[in-house]
Structures are given as C-alpha cells and as structure tokens.
Amino acid sequence: MLTPAATQERYVETSVGSLGVLRAGPAVSGRLPLLLIHGGGTDCSAISWYRLFEPLSTDRQAWAVDLPGFGRSMFVDPVGSPADMADLLAEVLRVLGIDSAIVCGVSMGGDAALNLALSHAPLVAGMILVAPGGLTPALKSPWAQRAAWYASRLPDAMLLPLGRFANRFVRASLNSMVKDPATLPEPVVEEFVRLAREPRGTLGYTRYNQATIGRDRMLNDLSDRVAEIDAPALFFHGAEDPLVDPEGSRRATAAMPDARLVMVPNCGHWAQVEQHDRFMAEAVHFLMEVDGLN
C-alpha cells in the first residue's frame, strides 16, 4: 500500500476491530497532536495526506486513522454514520493516550470531525475542515435527492457490482472533481485507482451514503448545531467544488463562534491536494494559533 514519506504504520485495537494508523513526527511540549481524517469514495489516509504528512509533522505528532472499510482498514466492517465514526475516533484517541488534539478532516472526514467536536468536545482543541460534509440540508435538486436515496437503498448484490463497474472510470471521476488534474500526484491517483478495483473498495463509502442520504433531505446535516462548537475552526474550501457546496462552509463559518473561511479560487473538491502550498500556509498558521490557546 501507499505510504507517505516520514510515516510509520501501526494498527490500533478498537471495539470494531484492528484499524490501520499512520504516524509521523515527534511529541513536542506545547505542540498539540494532529489527527487527520480522510474523505470518502476510495480515499484513505495515505491518499488524502500523501504530501502533507511530512511537513505537518515537523514539530508535532500527526496521526491518521483509516476508518473501517477504507485503506488499511478495508476488511473491518464499516460503521456508516458520521456520528459512529466520531465515537470510534474518540476511542482511537483514548487508546493512543491523546486527551486533546487538533482535528483535520476532508469531505466525509470533515463530517466525522464536526460530529467529534459535538459529541466529544474535550478531545477537540481545534479543527481544520476541508470541504466538509455534514453541512448540506438537501441536494440542490429534489430529483437528485430522490435518485441518490433510491440508489443508496439498492441491495449489496446490486450496489457493489455497480460500484466496481463505475470505478472502471475512476480516473475520469477524479479529473471531474478537481479543477486541474495536473495538480494530483501520480502515486495518489494510482492508489485511488488500485483501491477502487478492490472487491470491498466501495463498501465503506456505500455505508456512509446509506446512513446519510434521506428520501427528501440529508440525514447528516449539522447546520443547526455547529453554533454549539466552541473550538476554533479553519474552513478551507475550493470555490469551484463540484461535490460539496461551498455555501455550507460559508453558513457554518458565520454561525460558529470562532471560525474563519478560506475560499480558494480556481480550486475543486480536493483542496488540500490541489492547492497544497496555500493549504500548508493556512494550516501551519492555524496550528500555531491553537497551540497558543492551550
């Protein structure tokens, strides 16, 4: 499997099984550890944070968990809902002996991070949210909402083969979700394609969709609850994201007591990969700010 530079691989025993974890960086006094949470599709920690692990861990520990059904945890049965993901992430942090961390999640991982901050607030000292899910009341078209709901309710015997068939075109799918495909490192693309071809490659994201897509609305919408989050938050969102509406990040930033938004022009969904240098600059500044508050 793909392994980012400077990382070490280990497995953490949890109530749902053994989860793959990547670790990098030293434990430094005054520097909070960083928890990285990957996105959906056939994403995993090594893909989402491939270029970021090493620079983000020069002065702190960084940990990235592959959620059940993804990456190094592909053969652990998925938990599905972002609330359950948050409970599992809290369990992982406690197993690792971490009582407070800065949490960074992309897309589905951002949804899990928001739930973690709501359900396990003492564990979250701050959040970096890249194009986070969980902030959309409904898809823009009622027909699209209904179609997505019907598709998510197909039995596994139909849904998983359909997913594998669709993943034959995964390179085209990747190209459609970013503004400039040339910004994607080739090892990241190759690993995304490889995982998409695994028999269980789509199962984790399938269970997430089944848990979050309702007939007439999204079941994971936290728009009315984000004001409860006291932890400082940095939203980083591509202005031309075709998958997650940037308006969700705008509304959440306005509602939360300590949040700011970086809206990145000429950028699609995978903002931390597409705009690596800009993301690094914003993230490092935010990390230092949060360190100073603790």
Image (tube, rainbow, N blue to C red):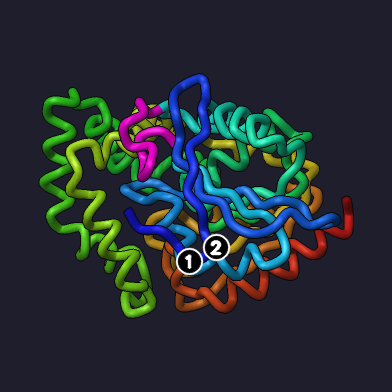
At a point 55% along the width and 28% down the height, the residue shown is 88
Q: Nearer the viewer, mark 1 or mark 2?
A: 1
* Residue situated in front as seen by the camera: 20 or 148: 20
Which residue does the numbered mark 1 point to in the structure image? 5
The answer to whether residue 271 of the structure is visible from this angle is: no
Q: Residue at x 24, y 30 (%)?
A: 150
Question: How crowded is the residue under tag 2: few (<14 C-alpha within 10 Å), some, or many (20+)?
Answer: many
In the image, the segment drawn in magenta is 67-78
**Residue found 74% across the figure and 55% down from its top:** 259
Of residue 114 and residue 217, the one placed in the foreground of this image is 114
Q: Amino acid at mark 2?
A: Phe
Amino acid residing under circle 1: Ala
Secondary structure of the residue carrying tag 1 is loop
Q: Using residue 268 as the reference point, say whether residue 60 is left or right of it.
A: right
Q: Quadrant of residue 225?
A: top right
Residue under label 2, please give it: 53
Q: Is residue 71 magenta?
A: yes
Callout 1 touching callout 2 (CB < 8 Å): yes
Query: Residue 120's spot in the image, x, y percent?
Result: 70, 30
Towards the viewer: 262 or 28? 28
